[in-house]
């Protein structure tokens, strides 16, 4: 009687747990992504970097306008004293505007503008990285949940087959070794199920850490719709799309453009600076009384020699420009490799899905035959166990193939900065 109750509880506990969680709405992939983008501190950091770059750009634009300053002073002095009058005072207002230095000011503005664009693209890249990480973690959770569910089903079958063996042993139509074999198989199935349960818990914890959501919010996850036979563009088209849209590459290219402007500034520093200055001066002392008047001058400043410091700086900036070019080419090579590998992974996953579906149909039918033969006394426990394990393996392969396909599509989305329905 106690064994029957234990078996009944084994079957009912999953259903009871599911009914308790059925009231909670399953968390969707998009909800997890939105939560992660809001929760992750690196997004706030990148947003602040964008703000800093924007302010730096506005600061650089200040070079297009004149510098206006004013100063005033007053006090006592015996230089121009008249009797007991020692008072003296000065005031002035000046405006200074750089007119020309081989595009130095404009290069500074362009540099800041490109760095601003790079910061915006870096923010976009961080968003894409977090989105990809959440997708990967979400899909891994679904994979581990499904593998755990299949393992529970396998434990149920192993327990049921043990009851078959015990009943047949009591009836005298089976050997003790069949019972021992069934008990061993059940222990093995329970061990594997516990392992899958731990993996499911670990994957859920990773999703919790990424999204900031609680375990209660992630008890149930909504399975994304899997579109079989999704149309994927050809390699060349995908590579062009990746080179055009990959945020990390675009950010690096803007940094390269900013470096070119720094090189321009270093070269411009070797040329004279032409500026115009104007102002109004006022001064007072007892002897000369009020003195006031305006003025305007053109000034030319040229630092002719500074120990070759400016020339060396220009050379260093040119080398940094080459470094950015090298990094850009390396990233393009990375995209070529990753696009190719991802397409191979997608094709491989599609083939494995098709093969695993045929395998599942075959192993399921074989399991039913083995079960009937054992119940009829014409089959052995070893054959029944082999059929059960083969059926379990086929289901696991199908689950893993679909997960591999979904993960490959998620990686393709990250590389091309595009969205595909998985």
Image (spheres, helix red, strand yellow):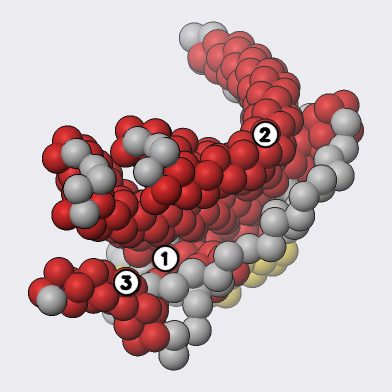
Residue found at x 63% / y 18% = 330
- The furthest residue to the left: 2
Mark 2: secondary structure: helix
Frontmost of labels 3 and 1 is 3
- The furthest residue to the bottom: 23
Residue 36 position within the rendered picture, expressed as x and y whole percent measured from the top left: 47, 65
Q: With 58 as the anchor, is 83 left or right in this view?
A: left
Residue 107 position within the rendered picture, expressed as x and y whole percent measured from the top left: 73, 37
Q: Earlier in the sequence, mark 2 or mark 1?
A: 1
Residue 86 position within the rendered picture, expressed as x and y whole percent measured from the top left: 33, 73
Which of the labelled discs sits on residue 11, or is there none?
A: 3
Which of the labelled discs sits on residue 355, or is there none?
A: 2
Q: Name the residue under label 1.
A: 211
The reply to whether discs 2 and 1 touch (Cβ–Cβ < 8 Å) is no
Mark 3: secondary structure: helix
Q: With 8 as the anchor, is 40 left or right in this view?
A: right
Within the image, what quadrant is residue 385 found in? top left
Question: Is 308 above or below relative to 412?
Answer: above
Q: Earlier in the sequence, mark 3 or mark 1?
A: 3
Q: Locate the N terminus by quadrant.
A: bottom left
Frontmost of labels 2 and 1 is 2
Residue found at x 39% / y 85% = 19
Q: Which of marks 2 and 3 is nearer the N terminus?
A: 3
Q: With 69 as the anchor, is 200 left or right in this view?
A: left
Q: Can residue 261 be seen in this view?
A: no
Frontmost of labels 2 and 3 is 3
């Amino acid at each position: 009687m106690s064994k029957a109750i234990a078996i009944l509880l084994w079957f009912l506990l999953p259903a009871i747990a599911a009914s308790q969680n059925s009231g909670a709405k399953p968390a969707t992939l998009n909800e997890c992504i939105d939560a992660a983008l809001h929760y992750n501190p690196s997004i706030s950091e990148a947003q602040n970097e964008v703000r800093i770059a924007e302010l730096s750009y506005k600061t650089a634009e200040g070079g297009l306008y004149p510098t206006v300053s004013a100063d005033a002073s007053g006090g006592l002095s015996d230089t121009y004293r008249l009797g007991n009058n020692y008072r003296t005072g000065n005031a002035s207002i000046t405006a200074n505007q750089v007119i020309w230095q081989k595009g130095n000011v404009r290069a500074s503005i362009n540099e800041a503008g490109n760095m601003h664009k790079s910061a915006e693209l870096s923010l976009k890249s961080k968003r894409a990285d977090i989105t990809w990480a959440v997708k990967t973690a979400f899909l891994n959770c679904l994979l581990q949940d499904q593998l755990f569910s299949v393992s529970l089903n396998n434990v149920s079958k192993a327990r049921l087959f043990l009851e078959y063996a015990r009943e047949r042993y009591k009836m005298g139509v089976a050997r003790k070794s069949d019972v021992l074999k069934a008990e061993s198989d059940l222990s093995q199935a329970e061990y594997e199920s516990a392992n899958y349960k731990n993996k499911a818990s670990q994957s859920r914890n990773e999703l919790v850490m990424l999204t900031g959501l609680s375990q209660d919010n992630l008890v149930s996850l909504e399975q994304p719709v899997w579109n079989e036979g999704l149309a994927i563009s050809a390699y060349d088209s995908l590579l062009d799309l990746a080179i055009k849209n990959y945020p990390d590459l675009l950010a690096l290219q803007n940094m390269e453009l900013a470096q070119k402007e720094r090189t321009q500034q270093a070269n411009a520093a070797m040329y004279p600076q032409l500026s115009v200055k104007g102002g109004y001066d006022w001064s007072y002392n007892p002897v000369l009384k009020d003195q006031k008047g305006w003025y305007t001058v053109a000034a030319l400043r040229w630092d002719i020699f500074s120990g070759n410091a400016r020339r060396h700086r220009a050379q260093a900036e040119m080398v940094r420009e080459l470094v950015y070019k090298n990094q850009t080419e390396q990233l393009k090579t990375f995209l070529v490799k990753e696009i190719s590998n991802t397409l191979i992974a997608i094709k491989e996953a599609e083939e494995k899905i098709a093969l695993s579906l045929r395998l599942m149909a075959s192993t399921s039918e074989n399991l039913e035959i083995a079960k009937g033969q054992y119940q009829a006394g014409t089959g052995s426990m070893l054959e029944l166990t082999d059929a059960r394990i083969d059926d379990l393996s086929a289901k696991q392969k199908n689950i893993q193939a679909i997960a591999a396909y979904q993960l490959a599509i998620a990686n393709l989305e990250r590389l091309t900065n595009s969205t595909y329905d998985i």
